[in-house]
Structure formats: structure tokens, C-alpha cells
Image (cartoon, rainbow, N blue to C red):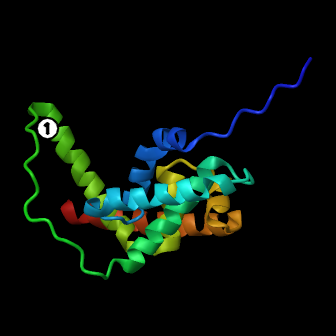
Amino acid sequence: MEPQPAAPDPGFEEIYEAHASRVLRTLRRLGVREADLEDVAQEVFVVVHRKLPEFAGRSSLKTWLFGICVRVASGFRQRAHVQRESLGETAPERANSGELAVRSIALKQARVQLDALLDRLDEDKRTVFVLFELEQFSMAEVGETLGVPQQTAWSRLYAARKFIEAAVSRHAEAIE
């Protein structure tokens, strides 16, 4: 049998198409405000475009890409003290009916609560929690993405889970 040729490395357009929605979701979960999300995502893909020729495959494309997300989001949050434009009222949303509206409202409320909890975590714990729990990275991928030993990542995840669980318990007790 003849050896199969290696699959060609994906091009920028293919990477963008495959990962853009996940990059946006991850950036939001890493603390990028909704109003800045597209600009920060664009910054991520500018870095990807610029660095793609240097990607040597020592890590998976996924961990490389989300490592860029983590660094860009961190840089954004460090610059967040800079005055940003403030939008007035948001555009009214399209009305849903009945059960769909209730479900939509519940999901938005849950997302707002999760985002508020994530905002209260320090950057290291938040990043591990987002990558492992929300983006479903393996712990090996989390460690590789962040350049930390897996045990360090597990420790940060444990602390983040403990914080989130305590906050959810306090919230549940408060509404009872």
C-alpha cells in the first residue's frame, strides 16, 4: 500500500468559517463586552492571518487558535479602562410568542447571570473554566492552550467550580 499524503493545512478562509462563531462565543465568555465583540474577534483573526504561515503544528489548530483568543481577550480587558463608546437604548427585539418567549427570556437571564459570575472570577480561573466547561476542551488542550501543567489547570478549574457553585447556592437561597 502506498502511504496516504498528508492533508493540506487549512487556509485562513477555512479556519474562519469553521471557528468564527466559537471564537465570538469564547471571547464573550472571556469578558469581552457585546459591543466590542466583533472588533475583538476581528483582532483575533488578524493575528491568525498574520501568524498562520508560522503555525508549525506543534499543537492542534484548535488550541493554537484559542490561545490567541485568550491572549487577545486578556489584552482587551487590560485596555478596558479606556473610555469606550456607549450605546444608548438597544434596538427592540423581535417579539416571540408564548412558550418560545419564556424560554428565550430564561436563556438570556441565565446567560447574564453566568457572565456576571464569570466576571467575578480572576482571569486564570475564568479562562480554564470557559475552555473546559463551556467550550468542552480536554484538560490536556486547556493546559496546552494556556502553557500550564495540567495539574495547575485542574487546580484552577476546581477553584472556579467551587466559586460558581457557592454563588449559585447563595442566589438560590436568596430567591427562596
The secondary element bearing badge 1 is classed as: helix
* Image point (19%, 71%), residue name: 85
Name the quadrant of the C terminus: bottom left
In terms of depth relative to the viewer, which is nearer, 19 or 143? 19
Q: Horizontal and vertical percent for residue 19?
A: 49, 44
* Image point (59%, 48%), residue name: 62
Residue 118 vs 56, above or below: the answer is below
Residue 69 vs 1, above or below: the answer is below
How would you rate the neighbour count of disc 1 (Cα within 10 Å): few for under 14, some for 14-19, many for 20 or more?
Answer: few
Q: Horizontal and vertical percent for residue 92?
A: 7, 48
* Image point (31%, 67%), residue name: 170
Residue 74 vs 14, above or below: the answer is below
User: Can you see residue 84?
Assistant: yes
| Quarter occupied by residue 50 | bottom right
The type of residue carrying mark 1 is: Ala
Q: Which residue is mark 1?
A: 101
Q: Horizontal and vertical percent for residue 58?
A: 75, 54
Q: Looking at this rendering, what residue extends furthest in the top direction? A: 1
Residue 134 as seen in the image, left or right of residue 92: right
Residue 88 vs 54, above or below: the answer is below
User: Can you see residue 162?
Assistant: no
In terms of depth relative to the viewer, which is nearer, 96 or 175? 96
